[in-house]
Amino acid sequence: MPWKLSHELFALAAIATIVVLALVIGPSLPDQVPTHFNGDGVADSYSSRPAFLYWSVGLTAGIYLLLTFVPLIDPFWKTIKPRYHLLTLLRDFVLGFSVAIFLLTVLAARDGRLPTNLLGVCIGVLIALIGNYLPRVPRNWFFGIRTPWTLASDVVWVKSHRVGGWMFVIAGVVLAVASVLGVPAHIALIVTILPPVVVAGFIYPFILLRRLQHDEMETAPDLSTPPTDHPNGGTL
């Protein structure tokens, strides 16, 4: 079992933070807490205060359990195991983002509007952090750029994650800076995230796999010619 307490301290601290915040700040929240917002940060959907608090704690704990233990049943577990700590690091980034979202929702409940620029900064930092570690992620079914073409080949996986890693780091930094400068978060998000998703997730791995398959066909022996009959009637 690869589970080690030293690798779980940040994750457990994130869950504990959500629980403490729910207990301390929860009673001061309004009866109806905004849980969904339009592009301008205006709430368009609400949940009761208890439902919001229970959902926040449960979702954070669920993310922890899912991202911690689901790699253990991955078909590529033998290749994942030496770098399992890397996957838990990516999990920690997501849990930290969950804490940030909780705090932003609390601010929205009190101020009446979601601080979309702060949200854009948080998303940008998360994307940049994940992108920085993408090139080191081993081929698996749960983390990284998981498309039919990347999962079909280790070569395509590695090269796509190298390209994707750089693209996501750049996209995350640009998104964070654009959010600080006041660019609407939903516009900045689409402009910065769409290119790496399309290029690194679909176009580049598709072209790369097709090239590899073409090269394999060029070097493979020709099996279309039937074997020559042996003079004695056999084929050997």
Image: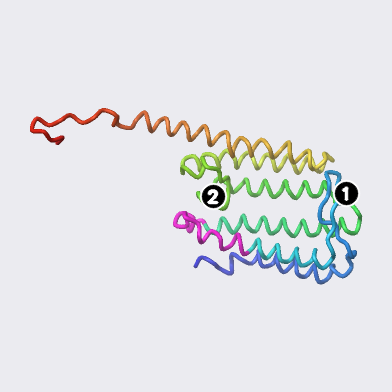
- Residue 52, percent across and down? 80, 63
Whether tag 1 and tag 2 are in contact, CB under 8 A, the answer is no
Q: Nearer the viewer, residue 226 or 98?
A: 226
Q: In the structure shown, which secondary structural element does the residue marked by tag 2 occupy?
A: loop
Which residue bears the numbered disc 1? 42
Residue 110 vs residue 211: left or right? Answer: right
Q: Nearer the viewer, residue 13 or 107?
A: 107
Q: Which residues are magenta?
A: 65-83
Q: Which mark is residue 137?
A: 2
**Residue 182 quadrant:** top right
- Residue 107, percent across and down? 86, 57
- Residue 114, percent across and down? 85, 51
Q: Nearer the viewer, mark 1 or mark 2?
A: 1
Q: CA distance from mark 1 to mark 2?
A: 37 Å
Q: Is residue 10 above or below residue 122?
A: below
Q: Main secondary structure of the magenta part?
A: helix
Label 1 Cα crowd, 10 Å radius (few <14 / some 14-19 / many 20+): some
Label 1 amino acid?
Val
Please identify the quadrant where the C terminus is shown: top left
